[in-house]
Image (cartoon, helix red, strand yellow):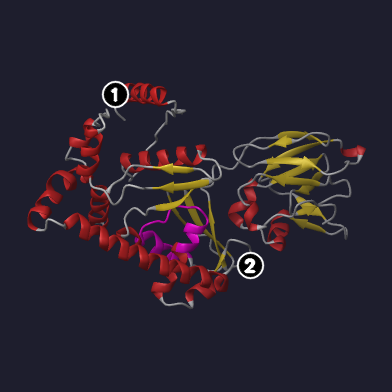
Amino acid sequence: MQPGSADWARHCRRVCDQLGVALTVRRLSLQPIRGESLEAVAREARLSAFADLVQPGELVATGQHRDDQAETVLLALLRGSGPRGLAGMIAERPIGAGRLVRPLLDWTRADLQAYAKTRGLTWIEDPSNANTDIDRNLVRHQVLPLLRRRWPAAGVTIARSARHCADATALLDRWADAELPAIAGSRPGTLAIKDLLRRDEGQQRALLRRAIEQQGFRVPSERILARILNELARARLDASPLVAWPGCEARRYRGDIYLIEPLPPVPSVNLRWRADRELVLPAWLGRIEPVGQMPSSSRELRVQFAPTGLYCRGADGRRRTLKKVWQQAGIPVWLRGYVPVFLDDGGPVLITGVAACSTAAPAVRWYGHPWERYGVFREALTDS
């Protein structure tokens, strides 16, 4: 984002070499999402990079201080945030396999600058920090100084309010954690719509927000939460509504709400598979591994996604349309196009994790797909 970033990396390398500290430099490719600020995208990208690097038992320590906290809380207030947003930056939270800690939140910018000067430290000033077209910088350079002239302890009192909101948020989270099992859906990780809608509106929002957070997705705005509750949860039973925000999609099937990663286009490839090898699937759909030996009469099979006009013959000899098989297995409509279907010259042999359509169907396991946590697909099939 800054022309001088390569110089900053060289500065960090010099300092780390002097101190004997290991340094990892990551160059991130940022792709802003429509309607989202570049600064927000950059923040998420940095946190994602930290999460990739941190190992179990390790801490990532960042340098935010009390003035940063005051800026964060004021910006959250201007956005109309609730207790979670007004809690500002919390002192410690999980990140990847480790913990993110902010040990300097009780110190001011002036305290840290005085310490750095006394110790003879050198640092680089980001020139964008002076740009008051950026909301945070406007608050830093114009709003907070004005507040401090009238209320000198403004930074302290704002931080105190943030702690109160953090306490309230923690209490609400504990309540939601205890209540979520009561609205669990028919599949792990899903929410039962009828049980969710029995609660009052405030509880619905709190439970939905906590479920999204627990599954590792970014909590959306109040407007998006309202759409999930009004457009998705109250849709017709045969509808397939979608509410999306960066990094997540809320979808419905029958009486449950699913929270999933955004779905890519349905694969249009035709693959060949032999039973003695692993099959790596397109996109992030994981891999197929054989279980035991496949009958020699079907040593090589085709693999397709979303085939149409075909039938599956079960162990009882009855033919069913693939649509009927999907319905009987309870596979969501929006998920069916991503399921590998094995075929020979006679038609479908196996719908992975759903149904065997032939006595020659291979036993396979499907690993690494993003829906494993829902228990939608069976591990290995030898019959229908």
Asked whether 261 or 343 is in front, the reply is 261
Element marked by disc 1: loop
Instruction: Describe residue 276's horizontal placement relative to residue 126 as left or right.
Output: right
Magenta-drawn segment: 210-232
- Residue 254: % across, % down: 59, 66
For image coordinates 16% across by 40% down, the residue present is 132
> Please, is residue 351 above or below residue 233 in the view?
above
The earlier-in-sequence mark between 1 and 2 is: 1
Q: Classify 28 as above or below 248.
A: above
Can you identify the residue that label 1 sits on? 3
Residue 190 vs 135, above or below: the answer is below
Decide whether residue 227 is among the magenta residues.
yes
What is the quadrant of residue 329 in the picture?
A: bottom right
User: Which amino acid, by three-letter code, is at mark 1?
Assistant: Pro
Query: Which mark, residue 186?
Result: 2
Cα separation between marks 1 and 2: 52 Å
Q: Depth check: give the residue in front, 382 or 309.
A: 382
Determine crowd level at label 1: few under 14, some 14-19, many 20+ residues with C-alpha closer than 10 A: few
Secondary structure predominantly adopted by residues drawn in magenta: helix
Image quadrant containing the C terminus:
bottom right
Residue type, mark 2 in image: Ser
Q: Quadrant of the N terminus?
A: top left
Image location of residue 28, percent across then percent down: 42, 31
What SS does tag 2 mark? loop
Above/below status of 205 relative to 89: below
Could you tell me which residue is drawn at 14 percent across and 43 percent down? 141
Residue farthest to the right, as pictured: 296
* Camera sees residue 28: yes
